[in-house]
Amino acid sequence: MEESELHQELPFFKNLQEYLREFVYGGIDGAVTTFAVVAGAVGANLDPMVIIILGFANLFADGLSMSIGAYLSSKSEKENYQKHKNIEYWEVDNIPKKEREEIVAIYREKGFKGELLQEVVNVIVSDRDRWVNEMMKDELNMIEEVKSPFKIGLATLISFIAVGFIPLTVYMWDYFYEANFDVFLWTCLLTGVAFIFVGALKSWVNQTGIWQSVIETLALGVIAAMVAYFVGDILEALLLK
Amino acid sequence: MEESELHQELPFFKNLQEYLREFVYGGIDGAVTTFAVVAGAVGANLDPMVIIILGFANLFADGLSMSIGAYLSSKSEKENYQKHKNIEYWEVDNIPKKEREEIVAIYREKGFKGELLQEVVNVIVSDRDRWVNEMMKDELNMIEEVKSPFKIGLATLISFIAVGFIPLTVYMWDYFYEANFDVFLWTCLLTGVAFIFVGALKSWVNQTGIWQSVIETLALGVIAAMVAYFVGDILEALLLK
C-alpha cells in the first residue's frame, strides 16, 4: 500500500498514527474534565474567574495525573509480560517434562492426536524461544504490547491539555477583551465541535462507523456537562440559600 | 488451588476480583479529580462552598463520563474483534487457498517444514473454527476480551464515585458541623490514606511489588494536587489583583 510506505518514511506521522488512540482518549478526557468545571460553575452561578482558575488547575493536574497513570499502567503491563516470560523460561529449563505436557495439551486442543501430535510437539520444544512463545500466547493468552509507555504518556498529556483547553478559550477571551456575546453558549458550541472532531478520529482508531462514533462522543460530553450543570445548580440552591 | 474454588462458588467475589482493575483505576481517577478541585480552590483562596459545589459537579460528571467511556471503549473493542473474526470466516470460505497459505506461513515461522508442515496445516484447516482461531491469534495478534463492557463501566462508576468522594468528606463535615481543625490538612491525610489503600490493591492487579505500587499511586495524587494548588495560587495572584 502506498500510504504505509509513506508512513515508514516519515517516523513522526507513523508515531502519530500509532499513538492516535492515546490522542483520542486523552483529548476526550481533557475536554470532559474542563467542560464539567465550566458547566458546574455556570450552573451554580459562580464567578467566571472561578471557571478560569479551577478550569486550568484541573486541566494541568488531571492532564498530568492521567498521562503519568497511562505511562505507569503501560509500563507495568510490559513488566508483567516480561515477568511471566521469565517464569516460562525458568519452567522450560527446570521442569521441561511438565511444560512439554502443556504443549501436548495445547495441540491436542487444536485437534492433533497420535503420532502427529508427538511430532508437532517435538518441533515446538526443539527451540527454547519458540516453546516459550507458544506458552505465552496459548497457555497465558498474553500478547506483548509494543508501544512505548513514555510515548503513551506523552501523547495523552499533549492531547489532554490541547483539547481540554478548548472549553476555557472563550472565558479567556472574555477576560481579556470582554466579550459581548453569550460566553457559555459559545463555549458549548466550540466544545461540541471539538467532541465531533475527536469522535471522528475515534472512529478511525476503533474501526467503527463515523456517525456512531461522533454521536457517542458528543453524547458523552453533553451528558457530563448536563450532570455538572445540574449538580452545580442544585447544590447552589441547597447550600447558598 | 483452594482460593479459586471458593471464587467459583461465590460469583460476587469472582466478579469483584475480575473487575478489580476497573475498581482500582476508577478509584484513582476519582480521587485525583476531586482532590485537584479541592487543592486548586484552596491554592486560589476560594470559598469552601466552591469546593463542595464543583467537587460534586466534577465527581458525578467525570465519574459518569469515565464509566460510559470505559463501557464504549470495551464494547467497540469486542465489536472490532468480532468484525475481524467475521472477515476471517468469509476469507476461509471464499479464498481458502490464500488463507491456507497464511497458515503455512505461520507454521513455517514456528519451525515446521516439508511434509510435516503440510500435515500440520491439514489438521488446522480441517476445522473452520480452529482455522479462524489460528488466524485471529497468530496472524492478527488479537485475543478476545472476555469481560462484560457493562460491568467494566459499572465497576468504574462505583469506584470513581466512592473513592472520589473521600477528598470531599471533610469539607462536608465542616459544612454541617463546623470543624475546629485544619480542614485542608485532614483532607490531604484522608486522601493520602485512600491513595495508599488503592495503591496496595493496584499491586495485586498488576502483580507488582506492593511498595512500588503504593509509592507510585501516592506520588501521582501528590503531584496532581500540588499542580492544582500552585496553578490555583498563581492564577489567583495574576487574575484577582
Image (cartoon, coloured by chain):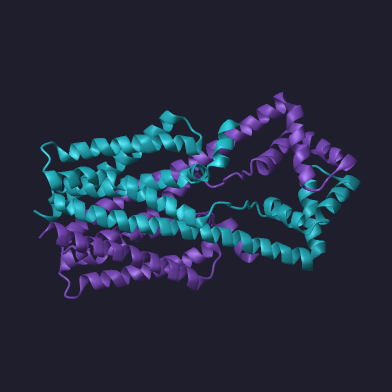
Chain colours: A purple, B cyan
**Relative horizontal placement of residue B129, taking residue B58 as reference (left or right):** right
Q: Quadrant of residue A215?
A: bottom left
Task: Point out the residue furthest to the top here.
Answer: A94
* Residue A83 locus on image (x, y percent): 58, 33
Query: How far across and how far down the image is residue A162, in percent?
Result: 35, 58
* Residue at figure coordinates x 69%, y 36% from the top left: A132
In the displayed structure image, the side of residue A49 where residue A224 appears, left or right: right
Location of residue A100 by image quarter: top right
The residue located at (48%, 63%) in the rendering is: A202
- Is residue B219 something one can see in this rendering? no
Image height of A168 relative to B218, above or below: below
Q: Identify which residue, B148 or A219, lies in the foreground.
A: B148
Task: Identify which residue is drawn at 76% across, 39% down.
Answer: A105
In the displayed structure image, the side of residue A234 where residue A116 appears, left or right: right
Q: Which corner quadrant holds the N terminus of chain B?
A: top right
Q: Residue furthest bottom?
A: A181
**Residue A171 visible, this angle:** yes
Residue B209, x across and y down, in percent: 47, 30
Looking at the picture, how far across and down is residue B122, in whole percent? 86, 53
Q: How many marks?
A: 0
Q: Is residue A145 above or below residue A185?
A: above
Left of A44 or right of it: where is A151?
Answer: right
Camera-side residue of A90 and A27:
A90
Residue sitting at x 30%, y 44%: B224
